[in-house]
Amino acid sequence: MGEQKTPAAEEELVPIKEQVYKDPRPIEQLQKYYDWPLTHKPGPIYDVVRLLLSTLVWVPYRARSVNSRRVPTSGPVIFAPNHFSNIDHFFVGAFTRRKLQFMAKSQLYHGWMSWVYKTGGVFPVRRGVRDEQAFQVVDSILSRGGCICMYCEGGRSRTGKMADKPKPGIGRVALQSGAVVVPVAIYGSQKVRNWKKLQAPKVRVSFGEPLRYEIVTDPTREQQQAAADEIFVEIKKLYAELEARASG
């Protein structure tokens, strides 16, 4: 019998470093990074970074997509992928011409990279608090017909496996905006953190059928969670299909 392949999530992973969960800085130091995307689309730096990072995605990680044609070519879209690595948004963005904007933990906003994030369409989210300003930015982007990449699980998986339950935030955004939600499964990116071992896993990205929700202006917590759960079920289905292909 041939040797059975080991699923990516079961292979040894380099641990993620412990992180400071809350940003101690006052909101005033971050305000300009919230304000910018309210009135600005991603600038030319987005295209430069996308070109550079897409080369990384396509060459060492040999990333390939499944059903990327399902992505709407116009109108507001919420891309909803699982989250294993700190470059998952590039794995998603490499296979669509739509410009993705996404949240990044506020602790990343230091030095010259803050300018790159701001002009590239990235905006901060303060972890450990109910960050209403981040949701305001999301609403603004979607109301202009833009695209958001939002991770159902919140932060990266430390185990290399998908979470048991999603956060309700994506359900809130889907219900309040009425934007199309595209579930996305990313398989193999948990081993991106092993780059120091010179390991570059094959990564596969699968795009699901778009989901649409009737607008609910003020959804309850239960409604938010129910929508998030439904989206997450679709992501898990897509992921299981990719996992079966990799193990077959």
Image (tube, grey):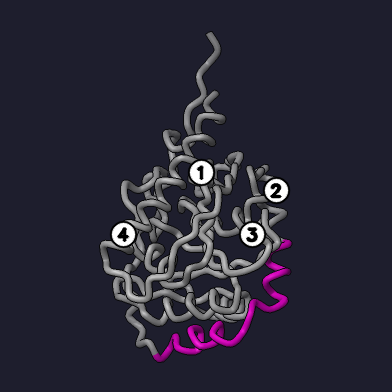
The verdict on residue 33 being magenta is yes
Place of residue 191 in the rendered image (x, y in percent of width and height, measured from the top left): 51, 43
Q: Is residue 17 visible?
A: no
Q: Is residue 237 visible?
A: yes
Query: The disc labelled 4 sits on which kind of residue?
Result: Gln
Camera-side residue of 173 and 217? 217
Camera-side residue of 23 and 247? 247
Q: Which residue is mark 2?
A: 58
Q: Which residues are magenta?
A: 28-51
Contact between marks 3 and 1 (CB within 8 A): the answer is no
Camera-side residue of 34 and 229? 229
Which of the two marks, 1 or 4, is nearer to us in this view? 4
Q: Which mark identifies residue 225?
A: 4
Residue at the spot x=39%, y=51% of the render?
230
Residue at the spot x=31%, y=46% of the render?
164
Dot 1, crowdedness within 10 Å: few (<14), some or many (≥20)?
A: many
**Distance from the alpha carbon under mark 1 to that under mark 4:** 29 Å
Secondary structure category for the residue under label 3: loop
**Distance from the alpha carbon under mark 4 to that under mark 3:** 25 Å
Query: The disc labelled 3 sits on which kind of residue?
Result: Pro
Q: Which residue is mark 3?
A: 72
Q: Considering only vertical position in the picture, is 35 above or below 84?
A: below
Q: Which residue is mark 1?
A: 191
The verdict on residue 44 being magenta is yes
Secondary structure category for the residue under label 2: helix
Place of residue 50 in the rendered image (x, y in percent of width and height, measured from the top left): 69, 63
